[in-house]
Image: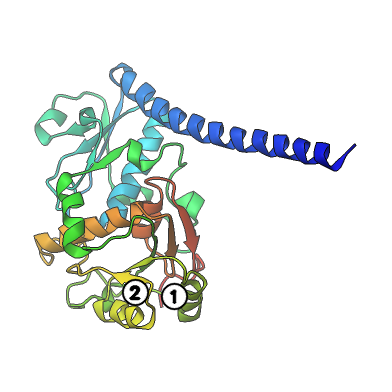
Amino acid sequence: MSIKTILVIIFLILLVIFTCIFYFAEYRKQTEDEIMKTYIKNYENFDNSIIYNFESGTGGLGDYIKFFMMTLTYCMNNNLRFYYKINNTNIEKYIKPIYDEMNITEEQISTLKNYKISVPQDWYMEFGEETLKKSYYNYNVNLDKVFYFDESIKQNVNNILPLIPNNYISIHLRMGDNFLDDPSKRLDDDSRKFSEKKLHAFIKKNSDKKIILLCDNTEKKKQIKKMYDNVIITSSDIGHTGLVNQITSKQVLDAVTEFYILTNSNLIYAPSNSGFSIVASKFKNVKFIRGFEWNEYRI
């Protein structure tokens, strides 16, 4: 067999492989759409319901979506009707369910017969149990098949990041409530573990890429920005979305906007443990690189 023939065979094999990969990706995308559409199509046929009740102060943005999806997944797997109770929280006006039939008000709940209320605490686990697979949900459906962002979020991107590149990777460094610009406004005593060495090694390894750095401490992200020309930071007003009466409307808007920026990354690197970045990676199934150990959560 000649070298030319061998090269042709290798080319054809590679062509088949890449074609299969492409069609599998398209099939998976269609399957995700079909999973949600089939569930909604059968929605009214389910006799029993679970109402997800997320109230202000229950948790932050990552918690809101994470426990929403865990409850929804449970309902989908058990032929139960899922509802999200409208509580007019500071988050729900910016990230909304695509399917309006999932929303329910206090008045509408009174018309239901067989239902159960589910709250985030129902899904909590003991410290140390958490893993990416166990803590969130089965990932059968990407989050962009369930939620959509309000237009005000997309419009706010240019306010906190005027020159956003078309292609970028992101770093989300969650230092903890103790390091917020105003640490008096915090949910609890919270300092997250992370490796400075790993963080800087990642930035240096990706010096040829535009990196958007998001952090809950303004001084820390400015410090890192000064060290690297390819690092871009936002001018957002930092606050924890889980705080009820201690966060401004602009802080909520900016926090959700940063979350939106993460969802559109080519890759997300998380030096520390945070549901914010983990959940963001599941909107479009963005590659997520964990720079922390699950048992190294807080200092």
Q: For the residue marked with disc 1, what is the amino acid?
A: Phe
Does any portion of residue 126 appear in the rendered image?
no
Residue at the image point whose x is 45% and y is 42% from the top: 139
Q: Is 174 located above or below residue 107 in the figure?
A: below
Dot 1 corresponds to which residue?
194
Report how far apart the C-alphas of labels 1 and 2 lie in the structure.
8 Å
Q: Are marks 1 and 2 in contact (CB under 8 Å)?
A: yes
- Residue 114 at x, y = what percent? 26, 25
Q: Which one is in front, 50 or 291?
A: 291
Residue at the image point whose x is 40% and y is 73% from the top: 298
- Within-10-Å neighbours for mark 2: few <14, some 14–19, many 20+: many
Dot 2 corresponds to which residue?
175
- Within-10-Å neighbours for mark 1: few <14, some 14–19, many 20+: many
Q: For the residue marked with disc 2, what is the amino acid?
A: Met
Q: Which one is in front, 155 or 64?
A: 155
Lateral position of residue 290 relative to residue 110, left or right: right
Does any portion of residue 209 appear in the rendered image?
yes
Of helix, strand and loop, which one carries label 1? loop
Which quadrant, please, contains the C terminus?
A: bottom left
Residue lying at the far top of the rendered structure: 45
